[in-house]
Amino acid sequence: MGTGGTTSASCSDEANMPPYYGTFQGVANFYPPQPSSSHNSYQGYTLLPVYAVLEGHPIRERRLPCCGLGLGWCMFILGFFLGGIPWYFGTFLLLCTRVDYREKPGLIACTIVSLIIVIAITLGSSHRHFVWWT
């Protein structure tokens, strides 16, 4: 009778296990991930234990000038119409002042274009056979 009870228990364990499909059965020393508990979730998102969730009001950042584009992108666009002078001003701002992190992509674009223009002017002016009137 004792052997019959253990056999029925092992059969019920096998019946509760999900079937394995395919030829790959997994690595023997790799344990399946543990299901997340309810105390480790916040509004349906699983939280990592190293990050703290701050409740309260979000931090509002000030608006960017020039219709929300920022000064860097505004100078980048204006440089095409004003002969590139705003690009050099944007390069000066990037290299010599402390700017908001949201302004940096536009100022970096100004710096890249101003460096390309300086290289093009330098290579163009060093050509000896360049004649203005022909």
Image (spheres, rainbow, N blue to C red):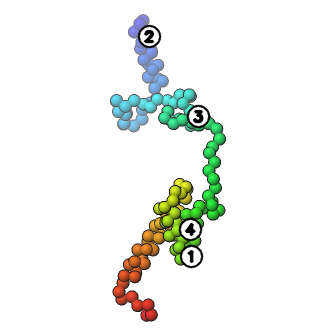
Q: Earlier in the sequence, mark 4 or mark 3?
A: 3
Instruction: Assess whether mark 1 and mark 3 are in contact (beta carbons under 8 angstroms).
Output: no
Closer to the eye: label 4 or 3:
4
Please give left or right for residue 5 compared with residue 82 in the image: left
Tell me the quarter of the image containing the C terminus: bottom left
On the question of residue 44 being in view, the answer is no
Task: Estimate how packed mark 3 is, as few (under 14), some (14 to 19) or many (20 or more) residues with alpha carbons within 10 Å.
Answer: few
Marks 1/2: CA distance?
91 Å
Find the distance from the CA under tag 1 to the CA under tag 4: 10 Å
Label 1, on which residue?
82
| First along the sequence among labels 3 and 1 | 3
Foreground mark, 3 or 1, reads: 1
Q: Is residue 21 above or below residue 96?
A: above
For the residue marked with disc 3, what is the amino acid?
Tyr
Residue at image location 55% in from the left, 63% down from the top: 72
Specify whether 96 is left or right of 124. Answer: right
What type is the residue that disc 2 sits on?
Answer: Gly
In percent of width and height, residue 3 lies at: 39, 9
Q: Which residue is mark 3?
A: 42
User: What residue does disc 2 label?
Assistant: 5
Disc nearer the start of the sequence (2/3) = 2
Quick one: SS at disc 2? helix
